[in-house]
Image (spheres, rainbow, N blue to C red):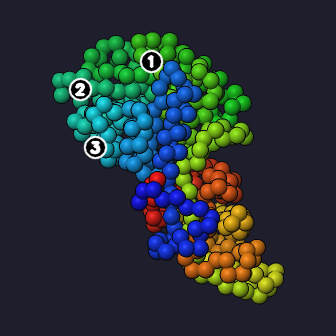
Amino acid sequence: MDGVTRTDSQSEEAGAGGASGYLTIDLAALARNYERLCAEVAPARAAAVVKADAYGLGAARVAERLYAHGCRDFFVAQFVEALALRPVLAADATVFVLNGLQPGNEFPAARDGIVPVINSLEQWRQWADAARMLARRLPAVLQFDTGMSRLGVPPEERAALADLVKTESGIDVLFVMSHLASADDADSGQNGDQLAEMERVAADFPQFPVCFANSGGVFLGKSYHGVLARPGIALYGGAPTAGRANPMEPVARLDIAVVQTRTVPAGTRVGYSGTHVTTGPTRLATIAAGYADGMLRSLSGRGAVFCDGVRLPIVGRVSMDSITIDVSALPEGRLKLGSLVEVLGPHQTLEDVARDAGTISYEILTSLGHRYERQYR
């Protein structure tokens, strides 16, 4: 459904649609975030990382909107994601696979114009073999490990790859890249170490342009940008730099419906194992989401939801399909069956929920389940 906006004043009746929860994705805010990132990296251009179903918000809808705003470079993590995304985009858009290709995926990738990020000599050889068998040049990106020890050709194999690049005519290298491990911490010395190593990579492969900055890297300065930055979490409203004001607009709002309300006396145990015990008469509400819906179990006794700007703490353990909240701070009768409470919205950010859950905004966003009604506006 498009064109839907939810406000606190709608909470009482907004559950009339019958859904247990509503995840609203603001595509206009997404587009403004992309434009903000483009302005930050100019004259370089900005790609969009849309892996994990665009961080849980719907890769097809997100990619379509970003394409309409000029984005032509899209990164996913797995080949299966690229297969799903490729038909959504026009032919002038490029889909890159960050993990590269598993054996057997080379020919479908070549057929559909999907570009692998090559992380090892083995992946290079597989892609080169495919190019020879197809008797045509195939595009690729070369990724180098500059200090994260996760993906990319390690320093000790860089010379061997350089020799392969010189002798192989079947692969068209579009650019070289690496990934910043600590870009969300602007004061981390690892950023400068990785930049220096990336500069050594660029010197070893001077014929290829550089792709380097992720969301945090975008705000580290132009020396980190290369010709193509590839922001992810910042597109979706997550803070790119810890401890600093978030320059991005929120994109996702989550409201969850009330299933039941009750008043209980002092000494009442709440939830599995009775980990919460009321200290006085307490009004409780049970809402229709749990850890199966991305409301992490670690929010038990720590997290909260909001209604009318009032913080309503989670009491007891988060269950698979439900959560109990203390609503004593609200006027009696304010919440009833079908009323909505705010999980993400004007009173609680991704970072707030992540803090309470003891995790990061990425996990909160990508964990949001598929039982919510998704509404794009």
Give the CA distance from mark 3 to mark 2. 23 Å
* Residue indicated by mark 1: 209
Displayed quadrant of residue 187:
top right
Q: Position of residue 29 (x, y in %)?
A: 53, 45
Q: Badge 2: how crowded within 10 Å, few (<14), some, or many (20+)?
A: many
Residue ID at (28%, 43%):
87
Q: Earlier in the sequence, mark 3 or mark 2?
A: 3
Look at label 1 and name its amino acid.
Answer: Pro
Determine contact: label 3, label 1, CB under 8 Å. Answer: no
Look at label 3 and name its amino acid.
Answer: Pro
For marks 1 and 2, give the one nearer the viewer.
Answer: 1
Secondary structure, mark 3, is helix
Determine contact: label 1, label 2, CB under 8 Å. Answer: no
Give the CA distance from mark 1 to mark 2. 22 Å
Residue ID at (30%, 14%):
167
Give the CA distance from mark 3 to mark 1. 28 Å
Determine contact: label 3, label 2, CB under 8 Å. Answer: no
Q: Quadrant of the N terminus?
A: bottom left
Displayed quadrant of residue 200:
top right
Q: Badge 1: how crowded within 10 Å, few (<14), some, or many (20+)?
A: some
Secondary structure, mark 2, is helix
Q: Is residue 244 left or right of residue 125?
A: right
* Residue indicated by mark 3: 87
Q: Position of residue 369 (x, y in %)?
A: 48, 61
* Residue indicated by mark 2: 131
Considering only vertical position in the picture, is 287 above or below 22?
below
Evaluate whether residue 98 shows in this view.
no
